[in-house]
Image (tube, helix red, strand yellow):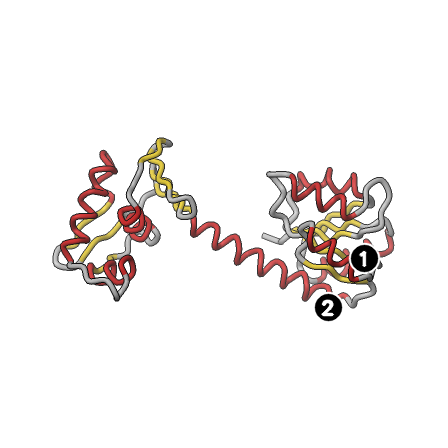
Amino acid sequence: MKQKILLVDDEKDIIEFLEYNLIKEGYDVISANDGVEALQMLGKKPDLIVLDVLMPKMNGFEVCAKIREDEEFKDIPVLFLTAKISEADEVHGLSIGADDYITKPISPKKLVARIKAVLRRTDADNELKNRQKIELGPISINREQYTVLINGEQVVFPRKEFEILAYLASQPGKVFHRDKILADIWGSDVFVVDRTVDVHVRKIREKLGDYADLIETIKGVGYRFKNVE
């Protein structure tokens, strides 16, 4: 699916010029001619916003601040493209949440390169966030908050039990050897025996209740979390 770029500038010739070059690079492009219209266009779910600063009705700094305050749209990357070249303006733009600040004029090739760089960073950030949250059937694991929900109800797991559960669930279908679990969860500097893993898995299964069989024992090897639709 094509990534969608929202261009916001009150100069229509600039919009048309950028639109032509971005479409040529394979992007889907939508546009707005002032800050108020830009906020109205957020519902079209752009993947990135190229935003001018000096615009009627609402300037670019105000638009960016509004976007960052909105829970639904706050993570959309914003790239300022503006004639305001002072260091103070650049610092202000970045401090209110812009992902990049570019001064005019700039060649289309350089602009596309900067857009691609911001989108790559955003994709990497999103991938990291997705790894922090694991959704497997009735079980939802949040590694950032150390929480586990089973059918929407929170179940408390002590730290090591949580880490083992999240570790196994991070790659469903993969068999993890006991010694690998020990090394990755406890580290090589702490002496624990294989039996420690077995005891923790037993306690995890007790808390999983009806879903205890999602963790499979591979005899003589270790454990595997079942693939769940």
Q: Disc number at residue 110?
A: 2
Q: Does residue 221 appear to the left or right of 46 in the view shown?
A: left
Instruction: Answer with the quarter of the image where residue 85 lies.
Output: bottom right
Q: Dot 1 surroundings within 10 Å: few (below 14), some, or many (20 or more)? A: many
The residue that appears at 25% across and 38% down in the rendered structure is: 208
Residue 91, percent across and down? 73, 58
Q: Is residue 131 above or below residue 147?
A: below
Q: Quadrant of residue 213?
A: top left
Q: Secondary structure at mark 2?
A: helix
Query: Quick one: quadrant of the C terminus?
Result: top left
Q: Is residue 202 above or below residue 176?
A: above
- Residue 111 in the figure: left or right of residue 14: left
Q: State the residue in front, 126 or 183.
A: 183
Foreground: disc 1 or disc 2: 1
| Residue 112 vs residue 186, the one in the foreground | 186
The amino acid type of the residue labelled 2 equals: Lys
Alpha-carbon distance for marks 1 and 2? 14 Å
Asked whether, in this view, residue 38 is left or right of residue 122, the answer is: right
Q: Residues within 10 Å of mark 2 (few under 14, many from 20)?
A: few
| Front-most of residues 113 and 163 | 163
Q: Amino acid at mark 1?
A: Thr
- Residue at 75 percent across and 43 percent down: it is 38
Q: Residue at x 20, y 48 (%)?
A: 200
Q: Which residue is mark 1?
A: 82
List x then y, in percent, for residue 77.
64, 52
Q: Which corner quadrant of the image does residue 69 belong to?
A: top right
